[in-house]
Amino acid sequence: MKRFLYHDLIVAGNFCNLKCSYCTSVADAGDFGAATSASARRRGATIAVGEVLAMVDGLRRHVDAPVLKLSGGELFLLVNAVELIEELAGRYAHVQVLTNGTELTPAIVARLSKLPNVGFNLSLDGHDDAMNALRWRSSRLGERVMAALGYIAAAGRPLEITMVVSDVNAPRLFDFLAFLAALPCRTLLVPIPVRGVHAAGLFGREARRGFADRLRRLPAGFASVLGPLAYYRRLADFLDEADGIRRQRCHLTAAAAQLFDTGAITPCPVGWTSEIANVRRDGIEAAVSQIGRHKLYELMAREPPRVPVCRTCFSQADMINLYLEGEASLAEMALMPMFGSAAALTRLAELPAARLAPSVPAAVLSG
């Protein structure tokens, strides 16, 4: 049995209702197969829940992980997405659901709020139209997303927000943090830079340097909406000192396994490279036998990174790297809802590179 921190499940990855200027994920998802479990690529389509669960359960028989990260596309375009989430919640210590918020309703939030081990990750670049200019094409969309944020906050659910940083929102980081700090729920902001082919055009050098300076001057009053402080410091260094080029080795392929509902398995849930096996084509045993063994694992673990997509990559998953390198403590990792369960913290301490990390406080593991 292989032991990882989390499984990353992509359902209908090429089905989204936004056309973010910096997005490559929807187009890239098509590289991992067109035979998704969705009945169609249109609003009101359904997920073949039983089919997805069969693949997930097959993965779980061979690769144990306490946490599931679930995303699309935009998952809530599929009318039975909540049914799938409820099933998955019974299989993991924590399920993190990624959404752009456009399809969230009070009924969906209320239903999922009954599941104590389900949390939201909302993609949101700021608290107004201007900061989300690369995401929203109309203020009406913005109103729907901000209403969804209000539903989650009113339910008192812990919320992680992923902010894609670009020229349009970088100058107003402190404004956004102040807005989030006033919400009536535990909220954590995780900024990630525009990456890939769009990086140079949408996040210029001067804007990167300015944002790095703000990260180094984060006011103490925003501590309640921040994760491990080492993350923000390393992001600052990545943006200016490293000029957006990754130097450090990445340990993520030893911490996570990714499965698409097309059956594809990939070695990294952030920098998609290529399919290493397919559950539908190869069968579960043959497919999962490639996890940790395929030649891409050795290639993606080199220092400095050799794979092109890795060279400009920086994401929220770098918190795992920071922990494994001893730069973030287990108590700081527990600030993140995705890693806050006792099962997740215990598994963090068991990862292959955990010898580099701080010792595990018993009080943290006990929750």
Image (tube, grey):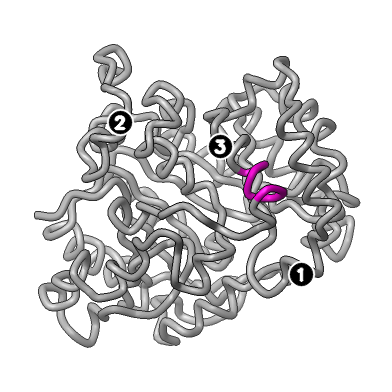
| As drawn, 183 above or below 311 | above
x and y percent of residue 157 in the render?
A: 54, 30
Quarter of the image for the C terminus: give it: top left
x and y percent of residue 246 in the render?
A: 55, 57
Which amino acid, mark 2? Leu
SS at badge 1: loop
Residue extent of the magenta highlight: 235-241
SS at badge 2: helix
For residue 297, the mark is: none
Q: Quadrant of residue 199?
A: bottom right
Which amino acid, mark 3? Tyr
Q: Quadrant of residue 342?
A: top left
Quarter of the image for the N terminus: give it: bottom left
Asked if the magenta segment contains residue 17, the reply would be: no
Q: Is residue 235 left or right of residue 72?
A: right
Residue picked out by circle 2: 345
Comes first in the chain, label 1 or label 2: 1
SS at badge 3: helix
x and y percent of residue 168 in the render?
A: 87, 54
What is the spatial separation of the Cα atoms under label 1 and label 2, in whole angstroms? 36 Å
Residue picked out by circle 3: 231
What is the spatial separation of the Cα atoms under label 3 and label 1, in whole angstroms? 25 Å
Which amino acid, mark 1? Ser
Q: Residues within 10 Å of mark 2 (few under 14, many from 20)?
A: many
Task: Pick the residue in front: 3 or 74.
Answer: 3
Residue picked out by circle 1: 21
User: For the point 26% across and 43% down, which residue is it?
Assistant: 353
Mark 3–mark 2 contact, CB under 8 Å?
A: no
x and y percent of residue 274 in the render?
A: 39, 80
User: For the point 79% across and 59% down, which residue is it?
Assistant: 203
